[in-house]
Every structure is written in C-alpha cells, then in structure tokens.
Amino acid sequence: MRPLRAGIAAFVVSVVALGAAPPGGAASAPLPARMADTGGGSQLVTAEAPRASATTGTVTWWDRRANGRWVKAGSAPARFGAKGLVEGSRRAQGTNTTPAGLYDLPFAFGTVAAPGGTTVAYRRVQRSSWWCQDNDSRSYNRWTQPRPADCRAAESEHLADYGTQYAHALVIGFNYHRPVRGRGAGIFLHVNGRAATAGCVSVPKADMRRILAWAKPGRAPHMAIGTTGGATAITRY
C-alpha cells in the first residue's frame, strides 16, 4: 500500500493528464460554462437573482472565444418583477413575475436613437407604436403600428408613454415565436424605472446602451434568466 501523500500526488497527476479540473474547479468556471444550454451562439446575456422571490440581481454579458472559453464583457445591477421569478412555462400574465428560461433576442427598440455601434435591428418608437397584450387579438405579444382594431388599448402598452424605461430595450423572446394566450406578453430587457418591473428585466441606462452596442446579430446572442439555485436555477437552461 502506497503512502497517502504519494496516492494524492498520483491522483492530481491523473486529473491533469485527463484535462479535468481539480475538485471545486467546476464551481469556479464562468457561468455560461456551467449552463445546460447557451443558445448555440457566441454571445450570451445572463440575468441571475439570488432566489426566486428576489427583485434584484445581476445582468452579465459574455463572449465565447474561438477556443470555446466564455469571457465576461460587462455586468450591471438588475431589477426583476415585483413578485420575483417563476419558471417561464408556468408563468401567468399579469402576475408581475419575470419568466426564467433561455430566450433569443428578436430585436431592439427605443424612444430615442440607437446607441452608436448598434447593429441589432432597432425600431424607433413612434406615437403610433404599441405592444399588444390583448389575449383576444391576433396581434398578441407583438409590436403593432398602428394598434389594430382587435387589440384593446386597455390591454396593451403604448410604448411612447414609457420614455424612461423604453429609451432603449431588447425584446426577450419569451412566449414570442408561438404565443400562448394568458402566459404573458411584452417581456423586455430595458432601462430602469423607479423600482421593480412588471415582469421584465431592467438595468441602468448606460449599461443598456453598452449591451446594445455589444450585441452582434451574427453571433446569435441569447438571454438566460434564473436564480443561483433551486427550481429556477439558471444553470438548468
């Protein structure tokens, strides 16, 4: 039987030889490297809260290098829904919860011009711009301009009325491509308002501008929303 010290040394050598990390290495890996899926692109935004009931957390944006390594490009304090986070597939409209999950970022918009360097599709908000949230409308969870007759104003957002929050925004692809009525509409990454959101994720204006200038359509940016652990752990997505 070999001495204990020799056995430990042999174990370490074998770990290095296999290219694996020592115990604890996985926990120290960049967040995207610990996730089940990152969307297949080389850019990722993560919005992580400490627990499902939290209304604040951190948004971080990441680049995947040619060698496959994820590197942090920036981070900012984040706000979530006033009622915290919930699994996206179980979310109900009007609950003031932010949907956890992995989503694409279809396009950006804003009440002011796009920041310099922005290459993502960017729509400028007009007085006739609405986001339809009417479950009975054929335009449910869609930008409309003008508002269609079957989309009630009381069940929609007049985007121009939110000059602060929607100075700049990215559409989060939650319930967007195949909308399920009653699950929720109008979930964005946007500029901070006065407090928690109605279900979106928000960051300071300067950081929102940085994210827009950073995001490149050809790199297929996605956004993952979740918590550090539990049923909505961000690493599940």
Image (spheres, rainbow, N blue to C red):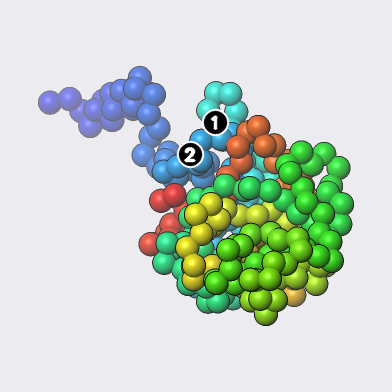
Q: Nearer the viewer, residue 174 or 53?
A: 174
Q: Is residue 142 above or below residue 84?
A: above
Splitting the image into 4 quarters, where does residue 11 fall? top left
Locate residue 200 relative to residue 237 in the image: left or right.
right
How packed mark 2 is, by other alpha carbons closer than 10 Å (few <14, some 14-19, many 20 or more), is some
Badge 1 element: loop
Q: Which mark is residue 69?
A: 1
Which quadrant would the N terminus be assigned to in this image?
Answer: top left
Going by the numbered disc 2, the residue's amino acid type is: Ala
Q: Nearer the viewer, residue 3 or 176?
A: 176
Q: Is residue 211 visible?
A: yes
- Which residue does the image show at 70% across and 76% down from the upper left? 153
How packed mark 1 is, by other alpha carbons closer than 10 Å (few <14, some 14-19, many 20 or more), is some
Q: Which mark is residue 236?
A: none
Residue 3 at what x, y percent from top left? Answer: 20, 28
- Which residue does the image show at 65% across and 55% down from the upper left? 171
Extreme residue toward the bottom, this view: 154
Q: Is residue 54 visible?
A: no
Badge 2 element: helix
Query: Do the residues bearing badges 2 and 1 touch, measured as CB atoms within 8 Å?
Result: yes
Residue ID for mark 2? 33
Locate residue 69 relative to residue 204 in the image: left or right.
left
Q: Is residue 109 above or below residue 120?
A: below
Extreme residue toward the front, this view: 149
Locate residue 34 relative to residue 13 in the image: left or right.
right
Going by the numbered disc 1, the residue's amino acid type is: Arg
- Which residue does the image show at 62% across and 48% down from the upper left? 105
The residues tagged by marks 2 and 1 sit, at their Cα atoms, a distance apart of 8 Å
Looking at the rendered structure, the number of numbered marks drawn on it comes to: 2
- Which residue does the image show at 69% across and 67% down from the upper left? 148
